[in-house]
Image (cartoon, rainbow, N blue to C red):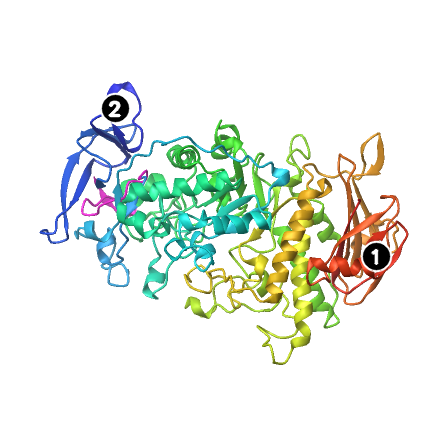
Amino acid sequence: MQPPRGRPPRLGVHLTGDGVDVAVLASHAEAVDLCLLDRDPASADGWTERRIPLDGPAYGVWHGHVPGVRVGQHYGFRAHGAWDPAAGTRYNPAKLLVDPYARALEGEVALGPAVYGHRVDAEGRTLGPGPELDPTDSRAHVPHAVVVDDRFDGEPTPRPHVPWTDTVIYEAHVRGLTQRLPGVPAELRGTYAGLAHPATIEHLLSLGVTTVELLPIHAVADEPHLVARGLTNYWGYNTLGFFAPNPAYATQGARAAGSQAVLSEVKGMVQLLHRAGLEVVLDVVYNHTCEGGTDGPQLSWRGLDPTLYYLHDGGRPARFADVTGCGNSLDFRRPRVVQMTLDSLRYWADVVGVDGFRFDLAVTLGRSAIGFEQDHPFLVALQTDPVLSGLKLIAEPWDVGPGGWRTGAFPAPMAEWNDRFRNAVRTFWLGDPAQAAHGRPGHGVRDLATRLAGSADLFGYTDPPLMRGVVASINYVTAHDGFTLADLVAYEHKHNHANGEGNRDGSDDNRSWNHGIEGPVRDKGVGLEILPLRRRSIRNLLGTLVLAAGTPMITAGDEIGRTQRGNNNAYCLDDETSWVDWELTEWRENLLATTRHLLRLRHENAALRSMHFYRGQPRSAADPRPDLDWRLADGTPFAHHHWLDPAVRTLQMTRTADDGSSVLLVLNGALDPVDITLADGTREHWELAWDSTWEHPGEVRVAAETNGGLHAVPGDELTLEPLAMRVYVAP
């Protein structure tokens, strides 16, 4: 049957005229019912249900118009068809299914046998010789989709449109950022409204960040293994609804008022951040869903069209192919999967108003029948879409499938998380010194220098060459996944026991250094002498991050020394382990001041905010200085063999911008002081702007009165402390 009015049906449930238009993809189903749900205390499970058969399929879509449906109506779908798990189809009308296009969800998954399409025991293990259909109705055990008015209401606040050259990303969790933030009222803490509260905004603006990147706020469901241990998927990388916000992050008042109020709170958060000049980027998880592996729960996609939505291994009996490490992978060879993802992105951009997206395990989104392809239809769509192409698009450039590491392989205008930057910075400031303390060699400065200059080896191979520029590199030292900045200098081993997985989860490649003692040093205990060096190491990591060429990303709480007590995979801990602690001791106050100072330096100096890759040549005929210049400690140029020498642990880096401004970074990664001769051929004189040996940037006043003051000229000799860096600017 063809859709009404001669046009393809719009997927989802949308208010139209006297009711709603309904359309759901279930191309292999024999029939689909729309189920309208109403509360009824007299019924056994508290609900009554009216089933309305849909017309179709039209191009695989079941559709209809239902009069009388209004905002707040709960609904779901039941799909009828073949129960043939060996062929990959598992149609079971006893299971109420979430609309993949639902704009709102209410309720939670009550894990148990009822939410599985096949018969399982209490632990979710398959019963019988093969997957046998389970007749238990799941209506009372699964979330319900809810009709909302998703049309934009009011006059939108203009997007800040922060240029990439000025962008500083702040990765945060909606709940974790404000759960303990003074100044935010108790009823707003850990919510969308709390994130947009003046106290939160004041901190973000005073810090100097421009763009808030939020961990997933799509509706989620917890994995069975977490539920069994009484834990939750705190990070939210387990999506149940790609269009629905997570209601758990809304205020109690909004949740009580219903889904429309929850959506309004999310929109309001974005608007308030925009008014403050802050962008909002969402971390989005389109690579897999919360339905788990081949025999996981039957909540939505699995019950509607599993062989279309999910990547399979091609065998019989049918099994999911897993390139995400999460049990399933959405199949981006399928146009309908690409369509769902693009529809979701446009919804969050057009209706909610967000400014961009960070794509989790983005390689999965570009996989075709032959593997990852740069010109995959989804990636081409991102480049050419009139709305999405103008937003900030960031790839996590790997997954766990074959050929899954693809850093540098994504097309413009996408930027990418640069794991090579993370590894190089940690290795130079932590891993190598830890080895040197035991008399073992390190890695020299070659890799670090490449990362400081914007990683042209990764992002420069385009047509034409160097088109993407240094801003394509999202530089980071920490992220939600891994040690915090403070823990990198205090732990050499992960301590993930609270996760309940025997400390087996989380990475073992941390490149951290505890400076001689594992874990915290008590105020009156042994090891107080290492605390200043730990703090200096934090400042070295932070300074390198902020001052390198590229786009810096700071993890929330690192600016105040947040610790997870050595847990490098706190994805399941919704408690003080993961929440930002805002009680600041003196050293944490100093670190906050240092972070603000460094970001101010970046903002005020064009030479720290380049768009283009460096060529080591003059920017213009009027200025003979090269845009990038490397010098050894004695002020002479690097020769080829110096880059290959692991004993070379000191470098000077001069960057000159188009406007003629320059900065000089001097780094000493050795365990001993090094005599430095400031490089010539730079400026007539320099002014010291920051030294990582300073506990507080206010120590610039002390430096101005000692050691010859702040001013220096090329050829001046100075001594740089062990494991330290300096920044000079041209006044």
The kind of residue tagged 1 is Gly
Which of the pair 189/58 is nearer the observer? 189
Q: CA distance from mark 2 to mark 1?
A: 78 Å
Residue 578 is left or right of residue 474, and the answer is left
Q: Please provide percent x and percent y for residue 524.
A: 61, 80
On residue 3, the disc is: 2
Which of the pair 333/282 is nearer the observer? 282
Q: Mark 2 vs mark 1: give the one in front.
A: 1
Vertical placement of residue 181 versus 377, above or below: below
Q: Are marks 2 and 1 in contact (CB under 8 Å)?
A: no
Q: Residue furthest top?
A: 6
Asked if the magenta segment contains residue 430, the reply would be no
Q: Quadrant of residue 471?
A: top right
Q: Please provide percent x and percent y for residue 498.
A: 43, 69
On residue 73, the disc is: none
Residue 367 is left or right of residue 728, and the answer is left
Q: Secondary structure at mark 2?
A: loop
What residue did someone put label 1 on? Answer: 709
Residue 294 visible in the snapshot: no
Asked if the magenta segment contains residue 82, the reply would be yes
Magenta-drawn stretch, dominant element (helix, strand or loop): loop
Q: Quadrant of residue 522?
A: bottom right
Instruction: Give the extent of the magenta segment.
Output: 78-102
Which residue corresponds to the image point at 70% horizontal and 57% vertical from the top-left? Answer: 697
Residue 729 is left or right of residue 165, and the answer is right
Vertical placement of residue 131 versus 15, above or below: below
Q: Quadrant of residue 675?
A: bottom right
Q: Please provide percent x and percent y for residue 158.
A: 49, 32
